[in-house]
Amino acid sequence: MNGKRALVTGGNSAIGSAICQELAKDGFHVIVHGHSHPESSESVASTIQDKGGTAETVSFDLTEADATLQALQGLLEQGPVQVLVHNAGMFHDAPMAGMTAEQWKQVIDVSLNGFFHVTQPLLLPMIRTRWGRIITISSLSGMIGHRGQTNYAAAKAGLHGASKSLAFEVASRGITVNVVAPGLIQSPSIEHTFTLEQIESMVPMKRVGQPEEVAVVVGFLASERASYLSGQVIGVNGAMAS
């Protein structure tokens, strides 16, 4: 164990679970966040523990600033959280001409407002240690856009700007801030949305990516080896976009 703690929001999703397991393998004590399905978070933590790692779970609504702060204050009583992976997000696709204000707001709230709610309280304790890693999980949509996803693309692109700006603010404190932007990654939603023929026509590598292929990039960014890499948006998309 390296003695450092890592919080992964949306840690009970397919990509989130892979990230949690990768960080645990690298010696971090992993805090698995989930809100809608806390039993899934417990399953991820149990998997980590079964493999010899250490993990715990936490449940709070990222869109609620007070609830998030209260939960984080409880975590900070045990010491600083030096790695934050903001993976939580949601879809609510619709053409913008037919999109409701609530569809817009919900997606922005989880991804972008959630980033502020979970990151800001952790910053000063992290800065005092003079070591930290902040990694946000974006999407290809945030890089190139996608039909029916003006809300989602706006939220994810907003994370790019926020992360680049925050990277400037904390660069002298031993803290890096980066974005990982996956393309089509294996999940139930991908299986139900795209046919094999569509995937082969869209992705130059002719396949979807695996959650573990995203997780290893996050693991590298969270490591000592990535200490000079900050303010970057890294696509993991099978060459769909640069």
Image (cartoon, grey):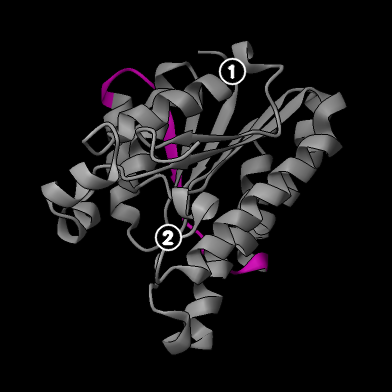
The CA distance from mark 1 to mark 2 is: 26 Å
Question: Circles 1 and 2: CB distance less than 8 Å?
Answer: no
Question: x and y percent of residue 198 in the render?
Answer: 18, 51
Asked if residue 173 is among those painted magenta in the image, a careful observer would answer no
Residue at the image point whose x is 79% and y is 24% from the top = 129
Q: Which residue is mark 1?
A: 3
- Element at label 2: loop
- Between circles 1 and 2, the one closer to the viewer is 2
Is residue 62 in sight in this rendering? no
Rendered image: mark on residue 35: 2
Q: Which residues are magenta?
A: 50-65
Residue type highlighted by circle 1: Gly
Q: Which class describes the residues within 10 Å of circle 1: few (<14), some (14-19), or many (20+)?
A: few
Question: x and y percent of residue 114 in the render?
Answer: 60, 60
Rendered image: mark on residue 85: none
Question: x and y percent of residue 210 in the render?
Answer: 27, 34
Asked if residue 59 is among those painted magenta in the image, a careful observer would answer yes
